[in-house]
Amino acid sequence: MVSVIIPSYNRIKYIENAIASIEEQSYQDFEIIVVDDGSTDGSFELLEEFSEAGRISLYSHENNENRGQSASINLGIMHATGLFVAVLDSDDYFAPDKLARQVAFLEENHNFGMVYGQGHAVDADGRFLFKVPDDNHAETSDPNILLLDCYMALPGGSLIRRSVFEKVGMFEESFRAGQDHDMALRIMEEFEVAFLPEVAFFYRKHGESISANGLETRWRTGMEILERARKRYPYRNRTIRKRKAVINYRLGQVYWKCGQKRRSIGYLIASGFLDPIRAGKVLLGSKS
């Protein structure tokens, strides 16, 4: 059985579509676990109706607290009874054969801990925008490549053996951004990972800009993810240096847009020293 976990927070417009995309799967051996993260838009009451109808198992945090996506996913994993775990954001939806094809792969390839497919980004109305990763992508199971560039469309694109979490631990609840990258790295450091070159799910790009504080949090969390990864696994020094360059560059961009020019320049200079080739490409306009 597959345990499909949906962490939900204020997604009344999309949550039923997410649930329906699981119910309509060609593979029907699943349970749907929804963890509400303190919603205030009426979606919790809607989910209670689905729970009473037997469509889902519904959980929430103590006192209906908002504890973040990682804590919600972890609570779902604690209640999961399937051999495999899939995570679906509450505004995304699965492709019809997602579970069938990924379950079949893991049942036939016991040395793999996780399999993932392609994600199609769509707008709020479901219109196609772009693919992640692209059609030519090939998985090497090299954590160095994943550390440098989180090329996976997560979490909805993947299927993970539940036993994997016993080895690598749960999602990091102190992270309010980047927790998917962190988990994917920890899995790849311990297990083989496979890519199936077919659409697995659709994820919505709402067009709502992330605040400057949100972007700063994302990239500062990225630095913490990097430091933890460096201590866990023998990553190449070149990989560590190039990833630091990317994070410093992104932080420099955030502060520049906020008008903190002096602070921004310090990060941009650090990025240039860490990866001068990339810095040269940025200056020449061949890399953003």
Image: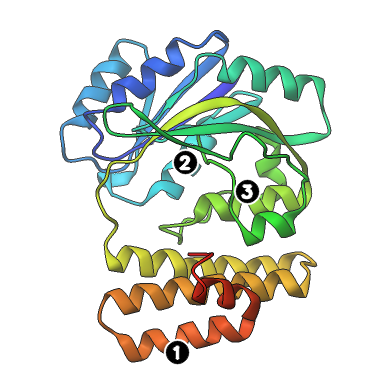
Mark with earlier residue (1, 3): 3
Q: Nearer the viewer, residue 45 or 121?
A: 121
On-image quarter of the N terminus: top right
Question: Residue 73: which disc?
Answer: 2
Q: Residues within 10 Å of mark 3 (few under 14, many from 20)?
A: many
Q: Amino acid at mark 3?
A: Ala
Task: Kindly report which numbered mark, 1 or 3, lies closer to the viewer in this rendering.
Answer: 1
Compared with 178, 104 (above or below) is above
**Picture quarter containing residue 47?**
top left
Q: Residue furthest front?
A: 284
Q: Which residue is mark 1?
A: 266
Q: Which residue is mark 3?
A: 184
Compared with 267, 179 (above or below) is above
Q: Nearer the viewer, residue 259 or 5?
A: 259
SS at badge 3: helix
Left or right, 105 with respect to 250, comes to right
Task: Kindly report which numbered mark, 3 or 2, lies closer to the viewer in this rendering.
Answer: 3
State the separation of the CA atoms marked 2 and 1. 37 Å
Residue 257 place in picture, x, y as percent: 29, 74
